[in-house]
Amino acid sequence: MSQIVGSQIVGIGASPLRKEDLRFVSGRGHYVADIKRPGMTAGVFLRSPHAHARLKSIDSAVAQAMPGVLAVFTGADLKAANVGGLPCGWGITGKDGKPMKEPPHPPLAQEKVRHVGDAVAFVVAETAEQARSAAEAIVVDYDMLPAVSGVLEALRPGAPAVFDEIPGNLCCDWELGDAAATEQAFAKAAHVAHVSLVNNRLIGNPMEPRAAVAEHEPTTGQYTLWTTSQFPHVVRLLMGNMVLGIPQHKLRVVAPDVGGGFGVKQFHYAEEAVVTWAAAKVGRPVKWVCERSEGFISDAHGRDHVTEAELALDEKGKFLAIRVKTLANMGGYLSTFGPNIPTNLYAPLLSGVYTIPAIYCEVKVVFTNTVPVDAYRGAGRPEATFVVERLVDIAAMEMGIDKADIRRRNMIPKEAYPYQTPVIVQYDSGDPAGCLAGAVEAADVAGFAARKQASLAKGKLRGLGFSTYIEACGLAPSRIAGRLGARGGLYESATVRVHPTGHVTVLIGTHNHGQGHETTFAQIVSEKLGVPFANVDIVFGDTDKVQFGMGTYGSRSLAVGGSALARASDKVITKGKKIAAHLLEADEQDVDFSAGVFSIAGTDRKKTFEEVALAAYVPHDYPLEILEPGLEEQAYYDPVNFTYPGGAHIAEVEIDPETGVVTLLNYTAVDDVGTVINPMIVEGQLHGGIAQGIGQALFENCVYDDDTGQLLSGSFMDYCMPRADTVPSMKISTHSTICTHTPLGSKGCGEVGTIGSPAAVTNAVVDALAHLGITHIDMPASPNRIWRLIQNAMLGRAAE
Amino acid sequence: MKISFKLNGKPVEVDIEPSLLLSELLRDKLDLTGTHVGCDTSQCGACVIHLDDESVKSCTILAVSVDGRSVTTVEGLASGEGVDGLHPMQRAFHENHGLQCGFCTPGMLMSAIDFAKRHPKPTEQEVRQWLEGNICRCTGYQNIVRSVLAGAAAMHAAS
């Protein structure tokens, strides 16, 4: 990694070391749990130990009298104070044209609890220990009800109703695509590949648990909430406007350093509202820090699909149609984006990187007695990729076609972009065959047969798995999102504030929680304005500082926020030219700007960016009628389309048939993320994303007990996170085509790794076991599962 | 009860409840918030500190047990200001993009330094096995492993 001096211009394509590192390696990061306020109290939530029960009574008299206890609040208190329910930000519409069922989501449970971990009461005390003791002394009389945790069970006739008013538990029966055209294509197919699969439920587990600190100033009515959020402005909008009724200008939401998000922190959570409301009630700051065990039962979970899918092919292995039926778990309430994930972010990706003339997808969105399910890194798109890439592999195996060949045969040719799929989205650019060719070479696919033989000689089974995939991200075009049910816009904003010295502060609505924005965004400004990299600071995460913003999720920060930043920088240049024209007594049209210098073409007359910045704030002889003092510009950017990163991933595994243990030997990725601003950071994002996908494919599984609805994988001892010794070193490179509609040409890279990798790893595992007649294994491909599959296959063979 | 110990090289005396964990003492009473708490089952390793130069999870030991001993936290690693003042391992994490959100980083650094002291010429596999007790959700570990290898080399070159 090159050492780059910050006093230089460090532009697009360079890999300067990260500006944010120094505070983190020094232990001087500033996370919500680190906050102390004068007079601060501690809050603890009492949570339901039952998956489904009627709340008969809550007796907190003993708890209220305990040492240090300031207050105990329940759902009844919130109701009496007219505190609203948590809003869902995305409404979907069913096949029948009717809106989804949208039951209330009270911040503290009322009448019923609907999952283990549903918050029942909130205790505020002088210390967290006192609050914990008091919470234990609250007596809740639960009338236990039968619970249902899986989607299949929830849809069975007579299943317990999560909401009394929604018998059958169906939130929405949704569809996308052309059913009739798909039916016709299947009727003339030479071959149909079929898969029944489960997309395993996951828990995002950013390493920093959620936390909130709130305070209220009664003389001004001003509230401040510090929260572990990926989108503080949206929390202010939803919580202030719809839950607590706090005017926006009286509510400051700050998300300081946040220790990872991955989607888990992009929702407005009940705890944020309760802590803020309680701070005003007790008249002192209140701090709540989630314990990890509590996070397991209160952070929104991800994935959790049960799917039947079919791919129709002609005799040459050309794809004719794809048909998908999915049951998606929503949990016990609708989270902020919940219903959008398994519908709008799923079905439109079922064309993958292929020309598939007909697609039809039905999704039943289902309530269960589990934690709400919402976006987790990739959010809908890994699920779609998994369906498509498993079907492609199964078709190749059944038809005897090479797995790379069948993909090449069906890929959208580079020259066919822009490509309109049959499922809404239009891909603007891409080169899937180029990515695949790069990955095939980098992974030494040619040498695989020899490596497989070598493994076999040691008694091991070796497999190679491909995944060629695409995602729609950079959320995104408000116009399209609105048509799909988004209740807000999805633009982004940036302000470029040039100081009289030429130093620059950027105020941006995205949020940096590991992505390196303080570095990449500074590179964009350094390149655009020709100012030294060291002279640019990026400010985010505080609604009192930053104008507005939708935050960071869906790989949108660079594609949307970076675009706003580029536009605002262009506006600065435009105004700078006006100022320079005045200073140089020239016509504005004659002023050029390059590498931080305004000059008059064909002359030696010039002004530096610093000189222009100073003149902007010291306007002694300004033509005030045509030029305002100051040099600060703002842009709100609303893209015209999603961006479509994609790529080719190849995994190589070795399985010990005696134990079922999988070793991931090699992982190769060639990704198309559009223009790369900082290659070092892009590579890091891919490493992390791929590791999370490997986690889903091999280790992670959120499991509920079918009978009781208890979470069985409720700690890091039961929920298997990828560790340093279970993830391989990966070979990463990019093969980029330029996004045709973002100012910088970038597509986004936050989620690509997590989207491509589960299918690649699973396909490799199945490839290793294919000689046993095995065509599918559900994730995670644990030793237990693999060993059973092998034993069953061998028993089957013995019986033949 | 009263205990006294050396914290980042300086003597400290505190009066604490016997049930207080070392992580709580450091974060809540002594305002050294660089030591992070990422779980409640001693699994994640975000809270690793050095007790008498040995890496331990500070969420797992009672504060009273450090009486008379020496504790080093991430705040005690650097010898000066800025990047130039960083400990070689801190610098290696910075130079090898060994961190993203930064939350696991203090624990990773403290584990890595102890590892490097015990392994003058470590292999990638040794690093990966040693870090088994530190979870990172951001990096996929690849750049952390690179950082630890580089940091170990730098530490031994310096000594």
Image (cartoon, rainbow, N blue to C red):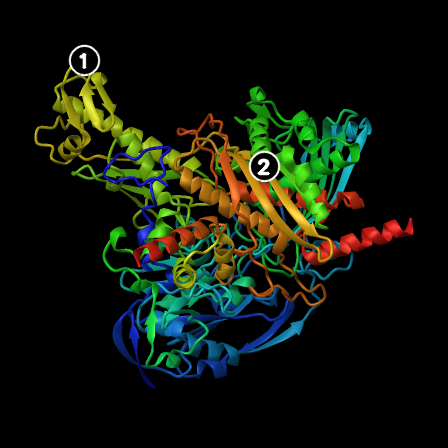
Is residue A324 something that shows in the picture?
A: yes
- Which residue is tagged 1? A602
Secondary structure of residue under mark 1 = loop
Q: Position of residue B6 (x, y in %)?
A: 29, 75
Residue B57 in which image quadrant: bottom left
Q: Amino acid at mark 1?
A: Gly
Q: Chain of mark 1?
A: A
Give the answer, above or below, for where B39 lies relative to A87.
below
- Which residue is tagged 2? A443
**In this view of the protein, which residue sits in the foreground, A636 or A701?**
A701
Q: Is residue A18 left or right of residue A671?
A: left
Q: Position of residue B101 (x, y in %)?
A: 41, 52
Q: Chain of mark 2?
A: A
Q: Is residue A294 left or right of residue A366?
A: left
Marks 2 and 1 sit apart, C-alpha to C-alpha, by 53 Å
Earlier along the polypeptide chain: callout 2 or callout 1? 2
- Residue sitting at x 66%, y 31%: A404
Q: Amino acid at mark 2?
A: Ala
Labels in figure, total:
2
Q: Position of residue A626 (x, y in %)?
A: 18, 25
Q: Residue furthest top?
A: A602
Secondary structure of residue under mark 2 = loop
